[in-house]
Amino acid sequence: MIYFSTSKSSTPVSMKRATLEGLAPDGGLYVPSELPTLSPAEIANLEGASFSDIGFAIAKKFVDGEVPPVELQRIVSDACSFETPLVRLDETTFVEELFHGPTLAFKDYGARFLARMTGWFAAEDRRMITVLVATSGDTGSAVAYGFQGIPNTRVVLLYPSGKVSRLQEQQLTTAGGNVHALEVKGDFDDCQRLVKEAFVDPELKSRLTLTSANSINISRLVPQSFYYAWAALRLREEHGLENPVFSVPSGNYGNLTAGVLAKKMGFPVGGFIAASNANDSVTRYLSEGRYEPRPTRRTLSTAMDVGNPSNFARLLHIYRGDHDAMARDIAATSVTDKETLETIRLAYERFGYVMDPHTAVGYRALQEMRREGKYIGTPAVVLSTAHPSKFLEAIEEALNIKVDVPERLRCLLEKEKRSTVIEPRFRELADFLNGLDG
């Protein structure tokens, strides 16, 4: 398996190089030369398999022998060592809880897999890897904790000042050790732009081995497909439900792109709902056929506040730029903050279930589609991307209840925040990176 850039002007590379580079030299995102598939027999053999065995079957197709199978299986098992529950809300609606990892967010799956893959490749080359990450919240903390204890690596996190929740910021700024937090006076798109500029800057590339742990990194993206395959097979085995639609809270569109990978590989996935907040560039594209990014708007579902999502380039590649083909697989709708709070209340009153704002956006989008007559009777899975305690203000505003904060988060509130404030100018980022070895 080789990987090439969505911009199509870079030389094809191995999985190792795609992982360690993160972004292609031409600024594009790495994609596989062809989408791997599993035969019906291979998928049938995975029925009843563990989560890590399903993940291993998928990872093998993308890694294609670059990591020995025994080592790759260990990497998958170690990265995905926590549970992934499917919670039934009603006859055909389920919530897949993706927040049972160390940082209580779905980003743990990708970050932990990427950290271990990076560690394996770095050990081969005996070099220091600098992991550069733009985050709107949960990515940064997942990366920070995913890379703890991984030799020959250091992490630099860029996050938008004042635009993440307090608990998220404490996770980003208290990891310490080989983790450095940069508080950018701008929005997430500024952070993402700075990261992209760093990867194509010849001076930095000559001095540092840079990689990314955002979903622009192919080794972050691949493991996110695991939980789509897991849920689709579990619904078939345990409930006799086929081809579910997945409602995906969508910001940078890595999560949804990973679901499309699972579907294209042959897993029994029916389709997707791209559930956005006010940052609805892709929603408007799917509805109108024109992609017109707008400046980022701040919402309650902060991790989805992305005006110009990077992974849209991968979706265009997978669907060969065919809007109609993409729209057949992916429906889309946007949800306001008012609707988000209403949905948190509704889910709690109806099911006794507490949703964080992102999960509420996903559930509301599904309900809106069903009101329009779509997916009625179709099994549906809402991806729950973060533990509600990470968004205490929104939950308490919606429900007027106190949410229990797990001890692993509660203890962070006592720690001292450590961050370096920078303007959203590339020169300030470059100066910081150049000073790491000083």
Image: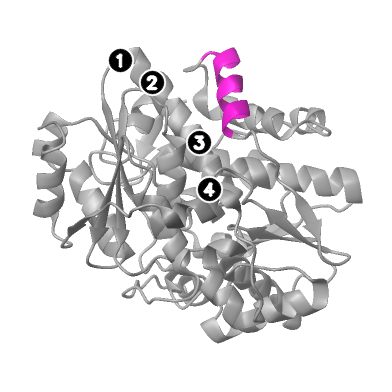
| 379 up-or-down from 415: above or below | below
Pair 4/1: label in front? 4
**Type of secondary structure dominating the magenta stretch:** helix
Alpha-carbon span between mark 4 and mark 1: 30 Å
**Quick one: SS at disc 1?**
helix
Alpha-carbon span between mark 2 and mark 3: 14 Å
The magenta stretch is: 68-79
Query: Mark 4 and mark 3 in contact (Cβ < 8 Å)?
Result: no
Can you tell which mark lies on residue 121? 2
Can you tell which mark lies on residue 125? 1
Q: Which residue is mark 4?
A: 103
Task: Please report whichever mark, 2 or 3, sits nearer to the chain's N-terminal start.
Answer: 3
Query: Mark 1 and mark 2 in contact (Cβ < 8 Å)?
Result: yes
Task: Say left or right for 87 vs 359.
Answer: right
**Quick one: SS at disc 3?**
helix
Q: Position of residue 390 (x, y in %)?
A: 53, 62
Q: Position of residue 61 (x, y in %)?
A: 57, 27
Query: Mark 3 and mark 2 in contact (Cβ < 8 Å)?
Result: no
How busy is the neighbourhood of tag 4: few (under 14 within 10 Å), some, or many (20 plus)? many
